[in-house]
C-alpha cells in the first residue's frame, strides 16, 4: 500500500511541476458513469453475475506538450462501483460488491489535429493506469477485499470548443480485488474487476 501512495504522490508532484513551468496546463471538473464486470478465477459457472451502473465525479488536470499533440491528464475522482454475485445454489450466500473509492487515473493522450475544424473538434486516444483506493470496510467477513484496485485504461474521446472533453474507456483489472472461501464448497475464489467508464469534463 505504501508503494502505491509513493507512486501517486510522485505523479501528482511531477504533473503539478510541469504545469507551473508551462502555460498549457489546465484544470477542470469531471463526472460520468461506469459499468463494472467481475471475473472469477474459478467456479465461474456457480454464480450469476449482475452488473449495475455506478458513477464517478471529481477534478482533473491536463498538461499538453506543445506542438506534437501529446498530453497527460491526472484526476482525483470519487467513484462508486456496484455489482452482485448470486450463487446458483439456493442455500449459498450472495455477494454484493458495492464499493466506494478514491480513484486516481493517469492517462497519456494523443490528440489528433484536424485541419480547418481543429479549434472546434479534436479527437484523441488515451491509455494509462488507474489506482482506486477503497474508502469503506468489508461488509461480509468471508470476503477479503484489497485496499487498492489497479486497472489499465484504454479509450477514445473528443474535445469540443477547446473546453469540453467527452470520453469512453475500458479498464482492465490488473490485480485481484477480492477473494472468498466457502461460499461455494471450500475452494478459494479470486476476483478481478474490469469496467467501462463514460465521462464528460470541462477544462478551464
Image (cartoon, grey):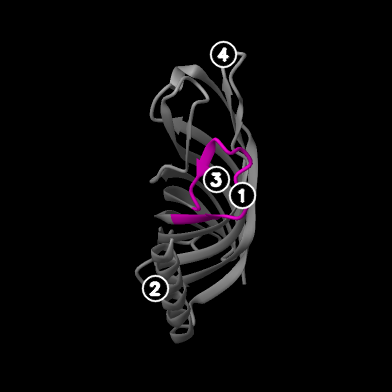
The residue that mark 4 highlights is 89
- In what element is the residue under mark 4? loop
The residue that mark 2 highlights is 65
Q: Which residues are magenta?
A: 130-147
Label 1: how many Cα within 10 Å (few below 14, some 14–19, many 20+): few
Tell me where residue 45 appears, x and y as whole percent: 46, 17
Q: Which callout, 2 or 3, points at the residue further toward the start of the chain?
A: 2
CA separation, marks 2 and 3? 25 Å
Tell me where residue 22 appears, x and y as whole percent: 45, 83
CA separation, marks 1 and 2? 41 Å
Residue at 43% across / 21% down in the picture? 43
Label 3: how many Cα within 10 Å (few below 14, some 14–19, many 20+): many
- In what element is the residue under mark 2? loop
Label 4: how many Cα within 10 Å (few below 14, some 14–19, many 20+): few
Based on the picture, tell me whether residue 34 belongs to the magenta stretch. no
Q: Nearer the viewer, mark 4 or mark 2?
A: 4
Q: Which callout, 4 or 3, points at the residue further toward the start of the chain?
A: 4
Residue contact at pointers 4 and 2, CB within 8 angstroms: no
Q: Is residue 22 visible?
A: yes
Q: Residue furthest left?
A: 68
Q: Nearer the viewer, mark 1 or mark 2?
A: 1
Label 2: how many Cα within 10 Å (few below 14, some 14–19, many 20+): some
> Image height check: is 115 above or below 49?
below
Amino acid at each position: 500500500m505504501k508503494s502505491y501512495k509513493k507512486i501517486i504522490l510522485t505523479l501528482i508532484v511531477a504533473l503539478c511541476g510541469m504545469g507551473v513551468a508551462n502555460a498549457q496546463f489546465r484544470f477542470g471538473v469531471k463526472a460520468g458513469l461506469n459499468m463494472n464486470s467481475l471475473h472469477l478465477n474459478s467456479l465461474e459457472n456457480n454464480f450469476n453475475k449482475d452488473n449495475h451502473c455506478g458513477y464517478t465525479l471529481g477534478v482533473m488536470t491536463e498538461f499538453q506538450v506543445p506542438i506534437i499533440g501529446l498530453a497527460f491528464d491526472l484526476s482525483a475522482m470519487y467513484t462508486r462501483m456496484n455489482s452482485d454475485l448470486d450463487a446458483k445454489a439456493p442455500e449459498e450466500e450472495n455477494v454484493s460488491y458495492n464499493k466506494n473509492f478514491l480513484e486516481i487515473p493517469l492517462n497519456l493522450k494523443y490528440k489528433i489535429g484536424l485541419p480547418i475544424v481543429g479549434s472546434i473538434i479534436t479527437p484523441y486516444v488515451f491509455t494509462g493506469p488507474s489506482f482506486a483506493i477503497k474508502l469503506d470496510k468489508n461488509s461480509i467477513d468471508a470476503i477479503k477485499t484489497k485496499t487498492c484496485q489497479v486497472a489499465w485504461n484504454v479509450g477514445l474521446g473528443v474535445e469540443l470548443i477547446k473546453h469540453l472533453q467527452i470520453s469512453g474507456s475500458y479498464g482492465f483489472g490488473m490485480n485481484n480485488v477480492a477473494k472468498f472461501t466457502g461460499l461455494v464448497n471450500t475452494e478459494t475464489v479470486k476476483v478481478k474487476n474490469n469496467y467501462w467508464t463514460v465521462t464528460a469534463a470541462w477544462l478551464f
